[in-house]
Image (cartoon, rainbow, N blue to C red):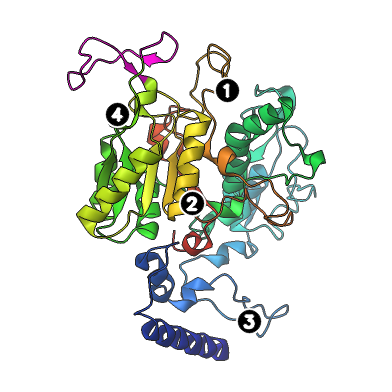
Amino acid sequence: FIQRRTQQQQQQQQQQKFSTSTSSSPPSKLSSTRAQNVLSLLPSYLLDARAITKYHPVNSPEGALQLSVAENQLSELPILDLDDAKHAKVAALMEDENDGAKRQGGERVTVETAGEGMTLVDVLSQLARSTVPRPSSSTGLPSAQSQTEVHVFEKEMIYYQPTQGVPGVRNAMAEYLQNLLVTPHRLATEGNGGTTENDGARCVAMDPENIILGAGCNAVLENLCMCLVEPGEAVMIPTPYYAAFEFDLVARAGCHIVPVNTFQHHPETPPQNTSTLAVTSSSTSHHNQPIPISSYYPNRSSLDQAYERSLAETSRPPRVLLLSHPNNPLGICYPPEVVKECIDWCREKEVHLISDEIYAGSVYRAERGVDSDGQGATFVSAMALAANHDNHAISSSDAGLGLGPYIHLVYALSKDFALSGLRVRVAYTENPEILVPM
């Protein structure tokens, strides 16, 4: 154990010498200095606290006693020497509603054997058990089969969990976001004669390892920008935008907001019933005419202008383009070709695109995915548009969507599920330089 710690300390010293000798080299475009410094600031014993083999007198006598982590592993030891009264209480806890309780793995537990080998974790799990019907995975409704005992307290819950989120929750979130954001576009493309898996395309899917869960919307967005943006560098946001973005990105992350003004970059077009937003503006020459929705779409011209403004105001290129899609406050969805243009522009300019799709499940205009005239999708996720299906570009064995390092997603349960108080936010990125720092 001591030898391993010494080796890691030597490796850290070498890394520090290397970072010092290369401090004059250009900074990475894939992550900020703050993100790159995270690993050097984190003590090595915390980096691999779970990788250390724990001591056991029989199974691993050469293991280590982990004294640097506040975890009560005594709760895994058997409860011994129970008197008759406590023995009866333990047995009562272990009883099943129908035919006697069962240990994990199916072994029946009786009054005579309840205390043998049972641990404190077993007791806590029984105290926290629940028989509330669970929704069926196929219908979404409670079923008779779902009215079985569920242990809502598992032993893993008493220990520290991965900071990016509990694996089970990340797996569920990846599956949910895949079905919400990626699968509808893939099915629509195949239905229109597009490329399918049988044509040699790479079947893409969200990788749970690239999901980071956080406590609330602003926390994850702020965290993501701190890992991508140096203090004082620009984040471009098409106008009008959600006012709280300024607090989320400026207060602690230190970003510089550059609005992307789009009006002057679209030709004058007469309003149409199906493609206009009933908003009037005294700042235009048409005081009483609705503004065409397309006037709000960012394009290369408006992005180039914001890019130059960023250079003028910060003396550095912008680092991030933040899209609210579906848009808050306008309530519109950017057409796929608009989002794709932003994706292509960001990749060419090496600017990170963050797509905030917190309203992705709240698109109700006609059928989801098709506008009222059947002219095209009302909402297509940037994840679906940026996904790489080409086996020649990315190995089919690679996990994830093939987004590359410049495309990122943020989402939350606040809007689609009306669970703003639950404070569940998720970021998805395939940029390896910021996964651990986040």
Q: Residue sitting at 79 percent across and 45 percent down?
A: 200
Q: Nearer the viewer, mark 2 or mark 3?
A: 2
**What residue is disc 2 on?**
347
Residue 146 location (% of width, % of height): 70, 29
* Residue where numbered disc 3 is placed: 63
Q: In the rendered structure, which amino acid carries the disc numbered 1?
A: Gly
Q: Which of the two marks, 3 or 4, is nearer to us in this view?
A: 4
For residue 290, which quarter of the picture? Answer: top left
* Chain-order first, disc 2 or disc 1: 2
Q: Earlier in the sequence, mark 1 or mark 4?
A: 4
- Residue at 38% across, 70% down: 27
First of labels 3, 4 by sequence position: 3
Q: CA distance from mark 2 to mark 4?
A: 24 Å
* Mark-to-mark CA distance, 1 and 3: 56 Å
Q: Residue 74 location, x and y as percent? A: 56, 66
Quadrant position of the C terminus in the picture: bottom left
Determine if the magenta segment contains residue 330. no
Residue tagged 4: 263
In this view, the mark in front (1 or 4): 4
- Taking the view exactly as shown, the residue that stands out farthest to the front is 267
